[in-house]
Amino acid sequence: MESKLQELKTRLTEIDDLESAASLLHWDQTTYMPPGGASARARQMATLNRLAHEKFTDPAVGELLEALRDYEESLPHDSDEASLIRVTRHAYEKAAKVPPAFMAELHSHGSESYQVWTKARPDNDFGAVQPYLEKTLDLSRQFADFFPGYAQIADPLIDFPDEGMTVSIIRPLFATLREQLVPIVQAIADAPPVDDSCLHQTFPEAQQLAFGTDVIKRFGYDFERGRQDKTHHPFATKFSLGDVRITTRSREDDLSEALFSTMHEAGHGMYEQGICMDFEGTPLANGTSAGVHESQSRLWENIVGRSRGFWRFFYPKLQSTFPDQLRRVPMETFYRAINKVERSLIRTDADEVTYNLHVMLRFDLELDLLEGTLAVSELPDAWRERFQADFGIVPPDDRDGVLQDVHWYAGTIGGCFQGYTLGNILNAQFFETALNAHPEITSEIEAGEFGTLHGWLKENIYQHGSKYTAPELIERVTGGPLRIEPYIRYLRSKYGELYPL
Amino acid sequence: MESKLQELKTRLTEIDDLESAASLLHWDQTTYMPPGGASARARQMATLNRLAHEKFTDPAVGELLEALRDYEESLPHDSDEASLIRVTRHAYEKAAKVPPAFMAELHSHGSESYQVWTKARPDNDFGAVQPYLEKTLDLSRQFADFFPGYAQIADPLIDFPDEGMTVSIIRPLFATLREQLVPIVQAIADAPPVDDSCLHQTFPEAQQLAFGTDVIKRFGYDFERGRQDKTHHPFATKFSLGDVRITTRSREDDLSEALFSTMHEAGHGMYEQGICMDFEGTPLANGTSAGVHESQSRLWENIVGRSRGFWRFFYPKLQSTFPDQLRRVPMETFYRAINKVERSLIRTDADEVTYNLHVMLRFDLELDLLEGTLAVSELPDAWRERFQADFGIVPPDDRDGVLQDVHWYAGTIGGCFQGYTLGNILNAQFFETALNAHPEITSEIEAGEFGTLHGWLKENIYQHGSKYTAPELIERVTGGPLRIEPYIRYLRSKYGELYPL
């Protein structure tokens, strides 16, 4: 069995090498690549991803996993080896169900559709993408049908990014959350607007980036095993457990842009930097789900980075960094500015409170499309109606409405968005658990110290990588299932103090 | 036949995608990778190179090439399609002769040996690497023996980087060159030393890099299809014909470091940027040999970049860039400083005149080792004796003697060095040909214009990529074989004016 396990690991490492190289090709594409490299680069990434997929779905991998079944069952469920075999088998069984020819069609259609979207969005032309989106919907349904036996057609699509999550778990949670959020947003909309002009002065980029770097070093992001570069749409990426990078962007007229994107991506990065080094090169060496990943980025960005305690320590430093701009701005003014809630059109610009309304709108529309209760041609109207219901305003055009996010136009319909809100819900649940275990975390944050929090996250979440599914991990860490109450408590407590809720 | 050719191209593109990704992994390793990424990165590069080699030596490639033989013969020899088939077949036949297991052993021994060398060099400990070098010599001989029928054992090793070149061609050329060079170096050594202190003031890096960038933009290096980054050991690399990058390094106390390395690597880069775009993804899309490649880097670095005409235009600009440092330095002083000839220990620091003595010393020792007339244990002594004979001085230790270059300690013995001197010889031969066709090149250089020269190089050399072997290309371009006379003329004319030869 030792030799079979070794052969499995050897194969997995080769696959990981291809995937890591594809990730580097992508990182370079979005950071340093000159314009002339674009067309070859797209092809190179497609080749490496295809080879990795072919090697992973090789029947020999299935045979190895089958041969290792008895061995796996002889080991404790939580052991690294049993977990490696179990997690690899789950991934293999999912991947092997989708024929390579279908994957190739899905990818090639996604690329074509993406090209059309890059023009259709600025042109505000939903009609141009509609036929592509109709085909995407058709392909998404076919994709789901490779997994017969699902309760809801979206379930297989959700299961890839968020294994163990289903429509029947998520839908009621989201409905309750929406019921809570809509009146909060309404109450805030009726309150006098917060003045956030202190964030919109001129802040030179170099100082912004240096300040952000200092913050995330204190969080525990390890620059010996990572780095930060500039890009258009910030992301975190892993080339190995010793090389987990983040990217950021800045605006000289918006102090919050680089600062919070840096903390957000550092949260993703620290998660993967904290995975047990023994998992290197295997499917265990990744964050366990989109939702748990997002919980880590949002925890550092919002719960820590937008807290009053955090700024008690850092605001004087920020003032010394930008004395002309902030010397006369009281901390409370700054604190309210970075936590300003407003009804805006764009998801990625949204604040902590309204963000989930953007996400749940998309999640519900995805389900309606997949279930056939909504036609693609009706999507722009459905978007406007729902937006009106949740935000009390209507997007003036499709550009900043149904066309704004790349997801549907480059991948599948279904499974794209739930992870963002699951992450928001989870970050509060995890943080509450950490605070119960270590109440001193609050005062440490006020002293610019994050060792206890970072240590707790490493111990309870990071180190395990994908060893446990999200539901298993949540149960292990919090003693129960995913719950929205901590998140509602967090929002009510924080924003109840800032606004008349 | 169309479909066979298409299948061949599809396979070659996939292989090129793997090789390009491996090149990016290497570029990143030497420019931006954090220290924690090192061990996984070495493995990732090895995996991609191995997969590329496996795919290229797949017998199906040989069968396709065989099936295409009649088609190839029906086409004009110079046509792109015939050239693609011919060049691919040559490369395939060479690659397929070496068993994959042997290649794996060679690479793994190379990595091991390199690790030992990185410590042995600073420790000045040849004894530590000697057993590794003995195995390398043994492997190099085995490598040659996969190509029975060679006239000289070094020929197969030379044929990989410099196809069509053999010991019987190179040895007499080098012997003549050496006869000419040794007395020149002796005469220069007897002359009063040139004062190059103007280069050794303090020159801030940013201005150095900006100046170099301006120079190579004027040469014609295309930043829309390339970029420059900092590294320890500068190199040029290609990820596609639309993305050919260069790297450089600078020393604040040595103005020549970044400047000439930038021009040198831009020469390599412009060669590959100038290859016919139709060759993308195929073996035609590379420079044709190590020697021709080096001729392009040395042409821009030395013949252009160290010429008096070039500095007539650029020296006033350099003075405005560094007014405090250069305002009082006459151009002639600067010109003599950048062309200072001196007997130094290190090849990579050597000037234009002595450089070839360093190279030929290594070339001859490689032959002696391969032919068995020199034992590895005798190598340090042989190095010192030859150095004494050529330079009139003896290296004080092995660190700056036989241990200085990585080549033998990480690859094979044989084929490593001839390309450098072939490049020097060729750059003069090509430039003389260009000047005969376009005498206005001289005055254009004095006006900071390089369009005619760059255009001639593109037309005659760059665009062809690997379509012609070096001997074929030299014949096409110059109307005859490789000749050292233009190079000797160039050196005698340039240095005869600077020194009493």
Image (tube, coloured by chain):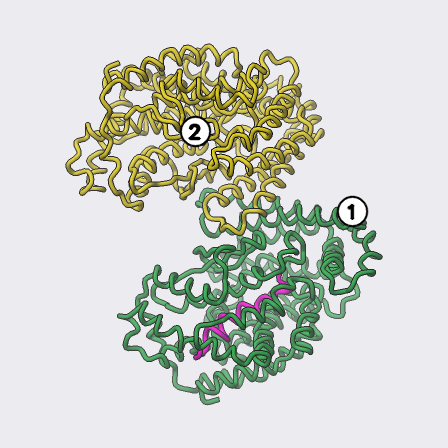
Chain colours: A yellow, B green
**Disc 1 on helix, strand or loop?**
helix
Q: Which chain carries label 2?
A: A
* Camera-side residue of B156 and A114: A114
Q: Quadrant of residue A211?
A: top left
Q: Which residue is drawn at 24% across and 24% down?
A: A193
Q: In which quarter of the image is the N terminus of chain A?
A: top right
In the displayed structure, A192 sits above or below A53; it is above
Q: Is residue A188 visible?
A: yes
* Camera-side residue of A57 and B465: B465
Q: Nearer the viewer, mark 2 or mark 1?
A: 2
Q: Mark 2 points at which residue?
A: A397
In the displayed structure, A105 sits above or below B213; it is above
Q: Can residue A85 be seen in this view?
A: no
Q: x, y percentage for residue B243?
A: 54, 53
Counting other residues with Cα less than 10 Å from the Cα at mark 2, is it few (<14), some (14-19), or many (20 or more)? some
Labels 2 and 1 within one chain: no
Q: x, y percentage for residue B88?
A: 73, 56
Furthest toward the left, the residue is A328
Q: Mark 1 points at which residue?
A: B3
* Camera-side residue of B84 and A393: A393
Counting other residues with Cα less than 10 Å from the Cα at mark 1, is it few (<14), some (14-19), or many (20 or more)? few
Q: Looking at numbered disc 2 in the image, what kind of residue is underneath it?
A: Asp
Q: x, y percentage for residue B245?
A: 51, 56
Q: Quadrant of the C terminus of chain A?
A: top left
**Disc 2 on helix, strand or loop?**
loop
In the rendered view, does B281 fall on the left or right side of B32? right
Q: Residue at x 44, y 72 (%)?
A: B448
